[in-house]
Image: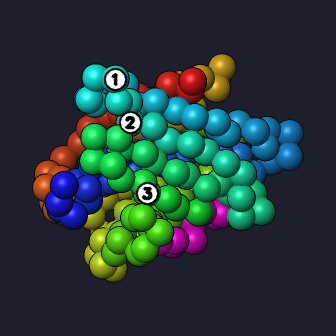
Amino acid sequence: MTHRRIIRWALGILAFSTIGSASAASAQVGVGTWERQGVQTPGQPLTMTVEACCSTGRRLTYRIPNLDAVLTVESPFNGTEVPLLMAGKPSGETMAITQVDDRHWTTVLKMNGKLFGTSKATLSADGRTLTVENDMTAAVGANAAGKSTETWVKK
């Protein structure tokens, strides 16, 4: 498993990482374990665990089983740029996640201080499906520039 391959996977999944809620009434929205639909190794789903942290923010923990990788980010969801950690160490990537309302978030992604992409996430009305529209403006690692859509389902 190479560092470049882990970064490629990280960049491919992290744009969706804008789950959470700032209001007390919906503080548990998004908390739990999510599985990415589509591309993954059979029997080894790509997952994200969301926990409350950072006052009104979230700790997002991504597990990529076929690469034996764990990625984490803690964001207050107020647009503050925070580091993405790989195995507990800074990866060079940062994320600035902003909560737009109870069901929408935006994320600005940078690698070593340079913008490489943005995403827009929408949580379904029932809180069970997260749809993420990614726009990678630059190729980073093995990740190509371009637009993509991801779907995540709450377990």
Q: Does 67 sit left or right of 154 as displayed?
A: left
Mark 3, residues whose alpha carbon is within 10 Å: few (<14), some, or many (≥20)? many
Residue 40 lies in the magenta stretch: no
* Mark 1 Cα shell of 10 Å, populated few (<14), some (14-19), many (≥20): few
Nearest the camera: 18 or 153? 153
Q: CA distance from mark 2 to mark 3?
A: 11 Å
Say which residue label 1 marks.
43
Q: Is residue 123 above or below residue 125?
A: below
Q: How far apart, in angstroms, are the residues tagged by discs 1 and 3?
A: 20 Å
Q: Is residue 119 shown to the viewer in this render?
A: no
Q: Is residue 50 above or below residue 42?
A: below
In the displayed structure, does residue 32 sit left or right of residue 6?
A: right
Q: Which image quadrant is residue 101 in?
A: top right
Q: Residue furthest right?
A: 25
Q: Which residue range is magenta in the image?
A: 75-83
Q: What is the number of the mark on residue 46? A: 2
On the question of residue 66 being in view, the answer is yes
SS label for mark 2: loop
Residue at 56 percent of width and 26 percent of height: 154
State the scheme by which the image is colored: rainbow
Secondary structure beneath label 1? loop
Q: For this view, does 30 lie left or right of residue 27?
A: left
Q: Which mark is residue 145?
A: none
Rounded to the nearest angstrom, the CA distance separating label 1 from label 2 is: 10 Å
Quadrant where the image shows the N terminus = bottom left
Mark 2: which amino acid?
Leu
Q: Position of residue 30 (x, y in %)?
A: 64, 37
The residue that disc 3 covers is: 71
Q: Residue 120 versus residue 1: which sits nearer the camera? A: 1
